[in-house]
Amino acid sequence: MSVVRTDEVRRPVPLGDLVGRVAHRMAREVERELAAAGLTIDQWRVLGLLADGAGHPMSEIAEHAMVPAPTLTKIVDRLTDSAMVYRRADVADRRRVLVLLSEHGRTVHDELAPGVAAAEDRMSGDLDAAERTTLRRLLERLAE
């Protein structure tokens, strides 16, 4: 656990603060990779989910991207305007709209993915493979 020194008194940094700091740094690294393509981290999260090839409803995308529904609508509108995603009615339930990745969106995602992965690797550069695996497993457990 990381410690902060204050007048020779050591107090542990709260876990939430540590996780927040790492998330903030990771987001900044990824945003640098996305800047040339003019994408935001939230847009990248949407493209990342849609890269599985399945259509997803807005509620699921909002949860995955960690944004409120009105914000997601703006994000998806911008991605639609850029021809990276499109909307279509769900064939199983015509009342529901799905968002899907277009061919252009797939190309953009596939071109940016290696750089994003490299940014994430830079963030965990001091960890060996076993530590990275352990960290991922622990974070997945906490996220659930």
Image (tube, grey):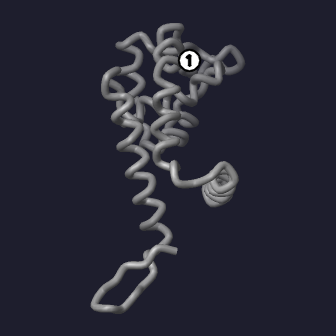
How far from the left and from the top, in percent, is residue 116? 47, 32
**Label 1: how many residues lie within 10 Å, few (<14), some (14-19) or many (20+)?**
many
Residue tagged 1: 100
Within the image, what quadrant is residue 11 found in? bottom left
* 37 or 54, nearer to the observer: 37
Question: Does residue 125 appear to the left or right of 79 in the view shown?
Answer: right
**Does dot 1 land on a helix, a strand or a loop?**
strand
Residue drawn 48% across the image and 17% down it: 111
Quadrant in which the C terminus is drawn? bottom right
Residue drawn 37% across the image and 79% down it: 4
* 140 or 65, nearer to the observer: 140
* 63 or 82, nearer to the observer: 82
Q: Name the amino acid type tagged 1.
A: Leu
Question: Does residue 87 appear to the left or right of 143 in the view shown?
Answer: left
How far from the left and from the top, in percent, is residue 30? 41, 37
Residue drawn 42% across the image and 29% down it: 43
Is residue 90 shown to the viewer in this render? Answer: yes
How far from the left and from the top, in percent, is residue 19? 48, 61
Residue drawn 35% across the image and 13% down it: 81
Toward the top, the furthest residue is 103
